[in-house]
Amino acid sequence: MHGCDPAELGQLTATVERILPTTSAVAAWLAAAAAGSQRYAVQVFNTLERVALDWVERHVGFARHVAQLALGHPRLELLHEPELSIVCFRYSASDAVNAEILQRLRRTTRLIPSSTVVGGQLAIRPCFVNPHTQPADVNALVDHVITIDDELTGTQSG
């Protein structure tokens, strides 16, 4: 390798893979290092690190936003505080109603949250990782949950 110590290359590559585990990130860094430009490789690494950190913070923010919406709505329950980009909430109804909400979300929208059980209760568990997710998509998830649940339980919104 021109201009880059192999031990340093290995250490930086491992760091890049930890921060942004995609082959394209590693390939970009290795290409810069192999081309003999340690300075350029460090610039690529710094850019990838900023992009990865921004991406993580954005998706963590989406989970926090859902948590706030759940806490602020009288018919939603926050079952677990957000961890990274995951949040667990539910409509204040039976597990059967929440299971049906999940099925309808998957059948009738672009939303595909997973589920889990928290404290013996079925939870709707979105995990925000799609780079195309927008704030409007996050709000739509909560709006759809409320609308579907209101239909199932006969509750009037407003």
Image: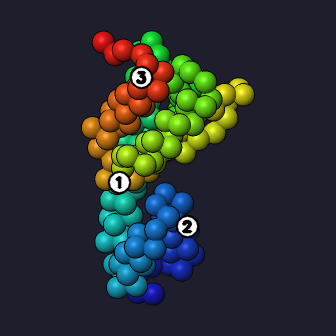
Q: Position of residue 88 (x, y in %)?
A: 55, 32
Front-lying residue, 119 or 102: 102
Amino acid at circle 3: Asp
Cα separation between marks 2 and 1:
23 Å
Give the image quarter of residue 27.
bottom left
Q: Is residue 61 left or right of residue 134?
A: right
Q: Is residue 88 visible?
A: no
- Label 3 – label 1 distance at C-alpha: 30 Å
Q: Is the C-beta separation of discs 3 and 2 under 8 Å?
A: no
Residue denoted by label 3: 150
Q: Which residue is mark 1?
A: 131
Q: Mark 3 and 1 residues: CB-CB less than 8 Å, in contact?
A: no
Q: Kindly indicate whether the residue at mark 1 contacts the one at mark 2 (C-beta within 8 angstroms).
A: no
Disc 3 vs disc 2: which is toward the camera?
3
102 over 146 or under it: above or below? below
Amino acid tagged 1: Pro
Q: Which residue is mark 2?
A: 14
Earlier sequence position, callout 3 versus callout 1: 1
| Type of amino acid at the residue the image marks with label 2 | Ala
Q: Is residue 150 above or below residue 142?
A: above
Point 37% across, 42% down: residue: 58
Depth order, front residue of 24/36: 24
- First in residue order: circle 2 vs circle 1: 2
Q: Residues within 10 Å of mark 1 (few under 14, many from 20)?
A: few
The image quadrant that residue 2 belongs to is bottom left
The Cα–Cα distance between marks 3 and 2, rounded to whole angstroms, is: 49 Å
Determine whether, in the image, residue 153 is placed left or right of residue 108.
right
* Label 3 or label 2, whichever comes before in sequence order: 2
Within-10-Å neighbours for mark 3: few <14, some 14–19, many 20+: some
Q: Does dot 1 land on a helix, a strand or a loop?
A: loop
Which one is in front, 109 or 22?
Answer: 109
Where residue 20 appears, as percent x and y from the top left, is 46, 61
